Image (spheres, rainbow, N blue to C red):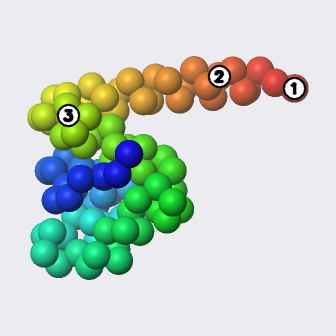
């Protein structure tokens, strides 16, 4: 699934802070993001599938329409990843 530009406000907030700001360029005004940079954000080029997944989950095309829903979606991701972490921690 491609990420829709321009990014919404919660995607921009995530881009500014995720990975110590490594993706902050995507929080710029849409007119300032080059087509090459937009292409790099797509799944085949982003280099960080967690960031890509976060952008997809926060995308309006996924019906993420407000900040409250963004937080709820992020909480679900954290819970799901915690279950996986706990299961992996049991492997010896």
* Number of residues whose C-alpha sits closer than 10 Å to that of mark 3, classed few (under 14), some (14–19) or many (20 or more): some
Secondary structure, mark 2, is helix
* Circle nearer the N terminus (1, 3): 3
Residue depicted at 20% across the width and 58% down the height: 5
Mark 1 and mark 3 in contact? Answer it, CB < 8 Å. Answer: no
> Left or right of 81: which side holds 55?
left
Expressed as whole percent of the image width and height from the top left, the position of residue 42 reads 41, 59
27, 3: nearer the viewer: 3
* Circle nearer the N terminus (1, 2): 2
Mark 2 and mark 3 in contact? Answer it, CB < 8 Å. Answer: no
**Real-space CA distance between mark 1 and mark 2, rounded to the nearest whole angstrom:** 12 Å
Quarter placement of the N terminus: top left
**Real-space CA distance between mark 1 and mark 3, rounded to the nearest whole angstrom:** 39 Å
Residue 64: assigned label: 3
Expressed as whole percent of the image width and height from the top left, the position of residue 53 reads 42, 44
The residue that label 2 is drawn on is 86
The residue that label 1 is drawn on is 92
* Circle nearer the N terminus (2, 3): 3
Quarter of the view holding residue 82: top right
* Number of residues whose C-alpha sits closer than 10 Å to that of mark 1, classed few (under 14), some (14–19) or many (20 or more): few
**Location of residue 46 with respect to 82 vertically, above or below:** below
Residue depicted at 12% across the width and 34% down the height: 66
Secondary structure, mark 3, is loop
Quarter of the view holding residue 18: bottom left
């Amino acid at each position: 699934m491609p990420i829709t530009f321009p990014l919404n406000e919660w995607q921009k907030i995530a881009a500014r802070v995720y990975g110590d700001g490594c993706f902050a360029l995507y929080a710029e005004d849409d007119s300032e993001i080059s087509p090459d940079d937009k292409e790099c954000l797509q799944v085949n080029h982003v280099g960080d599938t967690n960031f890509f997944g976060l952008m997809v989950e926060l995308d309006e095309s996924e019906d993420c329409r407000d900040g409250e829903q963004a937080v709820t979606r992020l909480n679900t991701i954290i819970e799901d990843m915690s279950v996986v972490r706990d299961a992996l921690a049991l492997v010896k």
